[in-house]
Amino acid sequence: MGKIEWAMWANEQALASGLILLTGGIVGVAGQFAGWQFAAYGVAAGVFVCLLEYPRGRRAKGTSVERTGQYCLTVCVKAFGPITRNYYVRAFLHAALCVPGGFMLATVLGCVCLGIASLIYLLAAIRGEQWLPILPKTETREKPRESIKEPPQNPPPRPPADLRRKRLEDVEGAAYVNPIPVTGSED
Amino acid sequence: MPQCVQECVHVQAWFQATCCIRTHSAFRLQTLSELLVTWCPSESMGNWIIDHGPSALILLVWTGINTFLFVYFYLFYDRGDRFFYTRHIIGSALSWARAPAAVLNFNCLLVLLPVCRNLLSLLRGSFVCCGRSLRKQLDKNLTFHKLVGYMIGLMTAVHTIAHLFNVEWFTRSRQGGFDILSTTLSRLGELENETYLNPVRDPNATPTYVAFTTIGGLTGVIITLALILMITSSMEVIRRSYFEVFWYIHHLFIIFFAGLVIHGAGRMVRSQTPTNPPHNFTVCKDQPLEWGKVPECPIPQFAGGFPQTWMWVIGPMFLYLCERLLRFIRYLQSVTYRKIIMRPSNVLELQLVKRGFKMEVGQYIFMNCPAISQLEWHPFTMTSAPEEDFFSVHIRSVGDWTEKLIKMLEQLPEGAQGPKMAVDGPFGTASEDVFDYEVSVLVGCGIGVTPFASILKSIWYKFKQSSPKLRTKKIYFYWLCRETHAFEWFADLLQVLEKEMAGRGMEDFLTYNLYLTGWDENHTAHVTVHFDKDTDVVTGLKQKTYYGRPIWDKEFQEIRKENPTSGVGVFLCGPETLAKTLEKKCVKYSDVDPRKTNFYFNKENF
């Protein structure tokens, strides 16, 4: 499981807030509630937050699962570079976006949710997380190294590194015995 | 599947809920339509009913009750004469708020039950007579919990939206924004010997003020927020990868239920009460200004409805409290370490002993190590056989909790007892079906091999004791995985079995095939170098590892050839796509003649 990436939860929370803000806005406008202009703002802000938050960021470790059809939005969000990458920006953006929602009841819930999302994003930003796009992997071939200057540390035949049963630090019990002690060149 | 291997919290942890052990149908949200889709023509209707009948029936009953409650309460508030004046102000939003409320009551009653795991174990124990298919329904508890959770979310949305309209229209009516009747109704309660209808008492109040100053409004906002946080933090990506976030945030349910119980205490939904002489709204609604002045139209009186939610949820809340108390008692019971073994690739094997602990194959336990965290319980599938005098789990270092545990135990001196450990369980229906077939084909994918450790051991013990419970004569074991090094402990187990069987001249009792699906040139070169060795280079077993995926047609044909007259049970612990393939193959290679080879597919046993 490893380290908690708070941004992942912040993203879920912000997306839900966007939807709640949007719903509240639609209700306010459709019902022509008092101060429905704030509801109209809620619709706009809700749509914006949803679009911004729909593309899920890449996890630092492990597999990242995309949301259905997020590719186009990923590209769009990625295009803004550091503005969308930095979670401090998101935290403050959401904090600012949620304020007008507090002026009418229909959007209050969306406003508070977005405020909470903003706090989680702030936590994520403080812990040094940032938004990275999930993009299809491009095949990268490792370039062959320039030249071999040192004697081989593990003379063949040897098992592939990832299948070696004994750990490296356990030299004694390693699967093979070096015929001569090997040291790196000192120069 | 590959995802499972990487994402699983521990070797076994939580994949009861999310990953492979119970994968596919058992723990995925199964809607009725999905159930119908999985019914394929090659499978007979009879089989379908046996496999999915109980789940479908439960879903049907649940949907039926929900629909009934919604419709009944919608009509109750939409038609009821007592609510005529209430409806005059807020219209059908009254019914649209009350109908979901009734459904919410019912679902809040249900949502706690599937997570009372000890209660479920108790039920499971008392259902012994009722057959396995019924007991297996209890293993789908988390699917049901999720389903109920989604229903609560949906109904909360409807309920909240309806109340937004209610609050808006009550306030507007209080300010005199509608017709004379509404204004008159809203002003009731200003004088003595009047009772109010409109819960908005202050003519200058805004909807937001009303929502935050009434019991119903404030608790509603708080518990909706709690619910939203619980839902967002229990999305699959969070639950799988950052279990602690999910686990701790989900405890907001305490606030949720506390708020829910007092939500109705404000008695804001008001209805007309009988007066003497009676106030007949059909006559009086057109002359509100004459109320109290003419004898046939006295001033109408109103009263709030009796709060009901607490009656719905108090029982399950009590049961859940008992459940948590029982967990606390389990937490206090002592568990001793029999052996602590470090396996290669950072896998820890714990052999534990607890008084009065009895297990069956394929079951799991929850473990709590107070030295790491007092609150976290982590699930692990047991890898020991019931015949052994201890129970064991294999823990792989993949998360904070497992890492800390392994570090702590590594620093222990030889033979010392580890830190205090609490064990709750065992849970889950035993997978004893395996013993019922003459020939068993076991297919494990990646992490899905874990329950087979217990099963293989148990089969071997039963075989040695020539137990009458065991009918198995032959086992084919297929192990498919992308990379084996995390599961070397399993290879070790196989090695031990292999040696024991060879010692008794029983080499052909167990045939196992390992398939490495994630291989590259690196492996190929390595295998080429060692091809002449007796044991496999990857696992050190006599059986060489295959590369790629098994060709099932070939495998099934061979099994049929080798066992021309047997019933063959096929057991899978792996992804849904493979389940479908195997299911089809089972149908394809089964003989029409019941005396010849027949394949029976089982996928939900683990």
Image (tube, coloured by chain):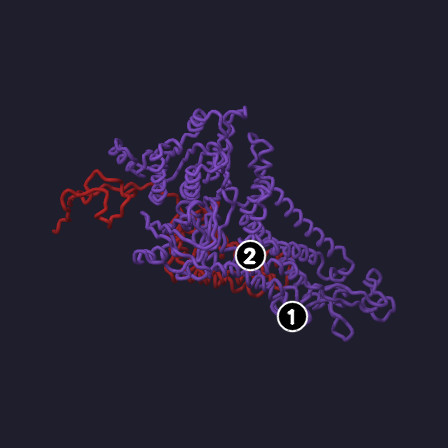
Q: Which is more toward the observer, B476 or A105?
A: B476
Q: Which chain is purple?
A: B
Q: Is residue B192 left or right of residue B1?
A: right
Q: Chain of mark 1?
A: B
Q: Residue at x 47, y 56 (%)?
A: B246
Query: What amino acid is found at the position of numbered circle 1 in the picture?
Result: Ala
Q: Secondary structure at mark 2?
A: helix
Kindly identify which numbered label has been placed on residue A25. Answer: none
Q: Which is more toward the observer, B163 or B285?
A: B163
Q: Position of residue B255 (x, y in %)?
A: 55, 63
| Image: B347 above or below B557 | below
Q: Position of residue A136 (x, y in %)?
A: 39, 43
Kindly identify which numbered label has been placed on residue A20. Answer: 2
> Which residue is disc 1 drawn over?
B205
Which quadrant: the N terminus of chain B?
Answer: top left
Do we see residue B254 in this rendering? yes
Question: Around disc 2, counting alpha carbons within 10 Å, would you say few (fewer than 14), some (14 to 19), or many (20 or more)?
Answer: many
Q: Colour of chain A?
A: red
Q: Which is more toward the observer, B89 or B339?
A: B339
Q: Secondary structure at mark 1?
A: loop
| Image: B603 above or below A66 | above
Whether label 2 touches label 1, CB < 8 Å: no
Q: Position of residue B414 (x, y in %)?
A: 30, 56
